[in-house]
Amino acid sequence: MTLPPNVYDAEPIPQAARDEIDRMLQSGDLFRYTAPENAPVTLLERDFAAFMGTKYALAVSSCSAALFLSLKALALPRGARVLIPGFTFAAVPSAIVHADCQPVLCEVGEDYRIDIPDFESRLAEDISAVIVSHMRGHTSDMDAIMAACAARGIPVVEDAAHSLGTTWHGRKIGTLGRVGCFSFQSYKLVNAGEGGIMVTDDADLVARAVIMSGAYEHNWAKHVTGPDAALEAAFARWQNKLPLYNLRLNNLSAAIIRAQLGEIDRRVADGRANHDYMAARLNASPWLHVPDKLGPEQRAPDSIQFNLVGLDEAETRAFAAAAAARGVKVQVFGLSSDNARAFWNWQFIPGPLPELPRTRAMLMRACDARLPARLTRPELDVIADALTGAAEDVMGPARAYGT
Ligand SMILES: *Cc1c(COP(=O)(O)O)cnc(C)c1O
C-alpha cells in the first residue's frame, strides 16, 4: 500500500547549480556587483526576462522586497491607498505598510478570485495603485481588472508569487500589469530558499527599482547589458536621488534559481495534470468542491484548494481532524489560529480592520492542501482517498443520487 506522501520536501537542486556553487565557493565571488559583467545574478535576470518575454528583470531578496520596490518605484506618496484582494498572504499588506502606504481590501468570492463589482466600486475610493495577488495561483478576471484600472489610470502590480507558468489568454501572468513580482521561497515552483524577482517593460520604473535595491554609485551600469538609451537616461535622471534599501540577491541564490529555469515547463505541466486529476476525484464527493478556473486561464498549480459543501463549523473541524488521522494535512484558512492568509489577523494595518463578509465566509470553508508536481498517480490516489474518506467519516457514506 502507498503511504501518504511527504508533500513538504522540495525536488533536488539540479547538478548544474552545484557545479556553479562549487566554483563560487572556490573564488569567493558571491556579491552581484564584484564581477565586471556576467555575474550569476545578471545572467539570471537576462534569462528570466527572456523566459517571461519582458524587457527587464530585477532579482531581489524576496517577492516581498519586489512588491515593496514596485510601490517605491511607482513613487506613491506617503499614505497612498493601495487596493488588494482580501484573500492573500500577509506579506502583501505588509509590503504596502513597509512602503508607507495604506492597504485597502476588496472582497474575494468562493472561487478564491477577486469579486469584480466590489473591486470596481472600491477602485473609486481614492486608490493610487492596485496589487493583484494571484493567491495560490488563482487568476482573477484580468480583462475586467486591467480595463477598470486603465480607465482610471491606476497602475497594476501583479503579485505572481504562486503563478510562475500561469497564462491568461496565452499571455504569461506577471506580464499583464506595469510590473510583476515572483518568489523563489521554498514553497514556490522554483526553490532557492529565499529570493524574488520583478519584471517590467518600463525603463524608468526599473531604473528606480534597481537603484533602490542597492545599486550604489554606478553599479546600475551592470544592469545595462545592451544598447538602451531610455534605460541609461533613466539611471542618469535618478542618480543620487533615491535611498538604497539594499534588497539585493546574492550569486549563490541566483545560481540555484537559474539552474531550475529549464525545469519550469515540466513542473507546470505535471502540476496542472496532478491538480486536474485530484480535482476530478474530489468533485466526485458530494461534500467537496473544487471551483473551476476562469476560461482564459491556464493554471500552474502546486497546491489544491477546495470548499466543503454543507458542513457546519464543527463538521469542518472534524473533517480536518479525520484527514489528519488518515495522514493528510488540510488547512482550513479561516479555522487555523493566527493564519497569515486570514485578513482579520492583519492587525498591523493602520486604522480599523475592515470586514469582508463574503471573503470571511469563503475562508471558513476553504481547504488548502499542498500538491507538489513530483507526486505520482498512486500518491495522488492516496491523498484523494484520504480526503473523500475523511468527508465520509464525518458526514456518513456518500450515496449516489437517485438510488
Ligand atoms: C509566498 C508569497 C509571497 C511572499 O513571497 P516571499 O518571497 O516569501 O516574500 C507573496 N504573495 C504570495 C501570494 C505568496 O504566496
Image (cartoon, grey):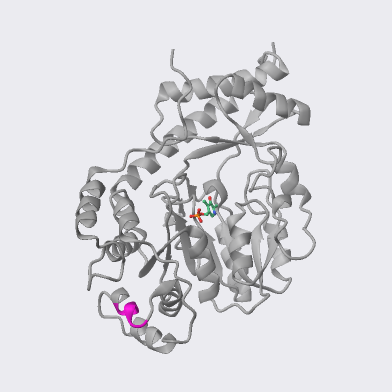
Depicted 36 relative to depicted 164: above or below: below
Q: What residue range appears in magenta? A: 217-221
Quarter that holds the C terminus: top right
Q: Main secondary structure of the magenta part?
A: helix
Q: Is residue 241 left or right of residue 192?
A: right
Q: Is residue 340 left or right of residue 275?
A: right
Q: Residue 388's image quarter?
A: top right
Quarter that holds the N terminus: top left
Residue 221, x across and y down, in percent: 30, 79
Depicted 242 relative to depicted 399: above or below: below
User: Which residue is at a point 30% across and 81% down the rendered structure image?
Assistant: 228
Residue 108, x across and y down, in percent: 68, 51
Foreground: 28 or 371? 28
Q: Is residue 86 visible?
A: yes
Foreground: 97 or 2? 97
Residue 52, x across and y down, in percent: 37, 60
Depicted 331 relative to depicted 87: above or below: above
Q: Is residue 336 left or right of residue 140?
A: right
Foreground: 244 or 266? 244
Marks counted in the figure total 0
Q: Is residue 382 left or right of residue 80?
A: left
